[in-house]
Structure formats: structure tokens, C-alpha cells
Amino acid sequence: MDLPFEPYRIKVVERIHRVSPQERARLLEEAGYNVFKIPSAAIYVDLLTDSGTSAMSDRQWAAMMTGDEAYAQSRSFVEFEEVVRGIFGYRHVIPTHQGRAAEGLLFATQVKPGQVVPSNIHFDTTRANVEHVGGIALDCVADEGLDPKLEAPFKGDMSLAKLKAAFEKYGAERIPLVMLTITNNSGGGQPVSLANIREVSAFCCEMGVPLIFDACRFAENAWFIQQREAGYADKSIDEICAEVFACGDGCTMSAKKDALVNIGGFVCLNDDQWALELTNLLILREGFPTYGGLAGRDLAAIAQGLREVMDPEYLAYRIGQVARLGRHLDELEVPYLHPAGGHAIYLDARAALPHIPQEQFPAQVFTAALYLEGGVRAVEIGSLMFDHLDPDTGAVVHPALELVRLAVPRRVYTHTQLDYVAEICARVMRNGPRLRGLEITYAPPALRHFTATLRPVAGGPF
Ligand code: F0G
């Protein structure tokens, strides 16, 4: 039977509600067509993010109850550090309250104004944190990762040619570190191959520049390597992770993804001096080095979540559930970035709404329409999130991809609920030609997609 079987049963449930279409229309208008502003109580299926939305296991909840809240050297930190070291293998483990705090510490201490940080594709918070300290965030994903229709196993791979060109253009002294995002969230949740990780690592070694992983979805990436890369079918997820992380010098991690918790993060580093500099800033910004802005119980839940995420049966179910949603959308002819990502499906808004130009935010239009049609909340990963100014010319640059991400929380929704989501996507497609573009009425200077408000072009309701 072609079903991704759940390797768990449900012990606790949470009631959700469907609000009327009229109410949804009112809420959407009030929210300035920005679904971040819609109350969660008025959302039926919430696919805004897979971050911090996991259902924790009975063992994680048990760990929460027995966490050690000592300010310094708590037992929960010792356990957390041991589990993190066991998977990632780096010498220093620095807890933070979430991923962007880890990035903030890394870039604030290691990136100087005018310096350049290449990645396959920076996530919005890594880009913003690099830019916040005056650095330039450079995306170097291989071209095949930018073609939404192409079926390829590792569309998160970095282009070595683009990376080399960056070193030629800026010089190694202007590049303090290289990042690799696994899986590549902003490019469709696509995995990075070990072959690519090895060649990027070898080049970084040659240049004398550290390679740091943005490791949020490292276990999902390892599962794809096991399933898709020649020579890894018989290796365990642990062995693959060990090989991946041995290629780098450290990582930043949002535990809100593959550590299966609702809050948390960390940085791992091998370099003693870097670790010292980050830790000094950590004490100022986050907390003492053995809790880093978290409660002891959070560290205990992360440790347990990291053990659970390495389970191949869990990963097969997890990635299988997303793939199943993809197959359903294929049947309904809803265009999305192929193949399905590890944690999400990325609808291709330019293909879905070809009549709406990129400056009128077609992906945001589709996102708003999903809410209006069925109370489904997705997130725009397109020009509202990623428009930026060209560092050389100052002109507005639209991102290459205009996507609507359906991020699937871990262990939360049933296959039936995702079938409903697919049907709502198909309905929005059918109404597509009637939808109009959006224009911004308010935008903050950074990370504008979170709080911007919009209205339909040429006035009137949506
Ligand atoms: N890096 C990647 C690749 C991410 O996907 C995220 C968060 C972060 C860093 C930052 O971590 O949220 O704990 O501060 N992504 C979430 C998302 C928000 O919806 O994809 P954080």
C-alpha cells in the first residue's frame, strides 16, 4: 500500500475550527492581506511554517517535567551537549533561544561591514542578519535549483562555479565564511548531496575559509542522501550525518525544525577563538553559556527530539507525507516546484497566476486566496519576502522564484487534512484568472513580509 505510515499513535488532540467565508474575507482585509496577521483561532489548516509547530512526543513531555533548571551547568545542558556532539561532532555547543539568535551571534562576531557570505540560498533571517552587520549575503545555488519544473535529486546543491566566481570577485579576505543550508529552504526544501558538500568543503579548505552549515533540517537532508545518492542506501542516518558535518567547521541550528521542539537553537563550532567570541556575546544577549536563553526543560526536550528525528521510520513517514501531498497536487494539475521538498511543497505562483506581474506579488496573492477559499494558511516565499537592492546598482532585484510554501508541521496533520489542502489549492487555481495583484500600503525596513500590509491594486475588495 502506497501510504506513508505514521510510526506513532495520537495521545492528545487540539480542537480546530472552520470560520465562515464571510468572516475569512473580513479577517483577510483587516490583516492587510498578510496572513501573518490573521488570528490562529481563525485558521483551519496552518501550513505557515514547520518551525516550532511540531507535536512533541510523550518522551519529550516527560523530559520537560524532569528538566534541571539550575542556572549553571544544569544536568539538562550536559545531556543536550552530549546528544548534539554525538550527531554533529563539533567541539563547542552553544545554546540559543532559536536559529536567528545563533546566526546573529555568528555574524555579529565574524562578519565585518563590506564582507561577503555566500550560501546556496540564504534563508530570510540569515540574509537579514548578514545585512544587519553590513555584510553582503550572496546566493550561489546551482542553476538547476532555480528551474521549478526540473526533476533532479539534489536541487539544493551549491554551484562551485558561482562560489569560485565570488572568491575571484571579492577575494578570500572579504569572505569570512561560507554557508550551506541543508535542506535549502528558500529554494524549495531541496536537499544538498554529499558529493556537493565534499566539493564545497574541499574548495573552502583550499581558500582557508570555514564552512558553516545552516543545519535546521539536517536529518531530512540525510534521509534524501540515503534514498537518492549512490553509495548511501546502506548507511544509517547517523553515519550520513557524521560524514556531512565532518566536511564543515560548525553549524547554526534552529531546533524548532528537526529537533522537534517548539523553541530552541544552537551554534556548534570547532574553532576555540570563534567559540569564545560568540560565547561572550551570548552572555550579553541570550544568557549564561549552559542555557543560552532557554529553560533547562527546553534543552532536555531538544535532546530527546534529536534522538527521535534520527529514526528512519519517522523520516520515511515525514518526507512521505509531504511527497503524498505533492502527488495529489500533480493529479489536480496544481504547479509546484519539483520534486516535492522535505518539509514543504512550494507552489509555483508565476505558473499559477501568469497574469500578475512580480511587482504585484503573485505568490502573496495566491497565499491570500488560499486563506479566503478554505482557511488554509501558507507563506509567501517570493518578491514580498526577497526583493532586495542590487549592491552594485541599487536597483530592485526580484527573486528568481515566486513561491507559496505549504510547510507541513511534523507529526501534526493527518493525510485527510492534507487532502483538503490539495483540493483548496485546486479551487484557487480555477479562480486564478479572476484574482488581482496586490500593492504595499506599509512595509518596515527589514524582513517586511512579517508585518507589511497590502491592498488589491486599483482598490476595492480582493
Ligand atoms: N535557517 C533556515 C534555513 C530556516 O528555515 C530558519 C527558519 C532559520 C534559519 C531561522 O530559525 O526561526 O529558529 O530563528 N525558518 C522558519 C520557516 C521561520 O518558516 O522556514 P528561527
Image: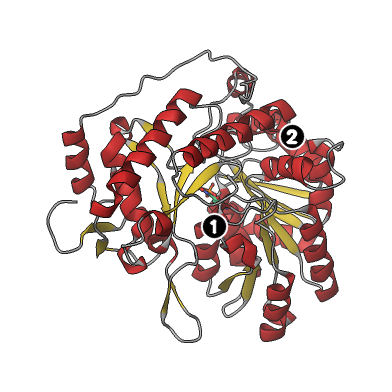
Separation (CA) of disc 2 from disc 1: 44 Å
Q: Nearer the viewer, residue 402 or 260?
A: 402
Q: Residue 363: horizontal and vertical position, in percent?
A: 38, 55
Q: Is residue 245 above or below residue 236?
A: below
Q: Residue 130: horizontal and vertical position, in percent?
A: 55, 67
450 displayed left or right of 186: left
The quarter of the displayed image where residue 174 is located: bottom right
Q: Residue 408: horizontal and vertical position, in percent?
A: 51, 37
Q: Residue 423: horizontal and vertical position, in percent?
A: 38, 34
Q: Residue drawn at (61%, 75%), measured in percent from left and top? A: 112
141 displayed left or right of 274: left
140 displayed left or right of 414: right
State yes or no: discs 2 and 1 in contact (Cβ < 8 Å): no
On the image, numbered disc 2 is attached to which residue?
Answer: 78
Secondary structure of residue under mark 2:
helix
Q: Is residue 206 above or below residue 353?
A: below
**CB at mark 2 closer than 8 A to ligand 1?**
no
- Amino acid under label 2? Val
Q: Residues within 10 Å of mark 2 (few under 14, many from 20)?
A: some
Earlier in the chain: of badge 2 and badge 1, it is 2
Q: Residue drawn at (28%, 26%), measured in percent from left and top? A: 18
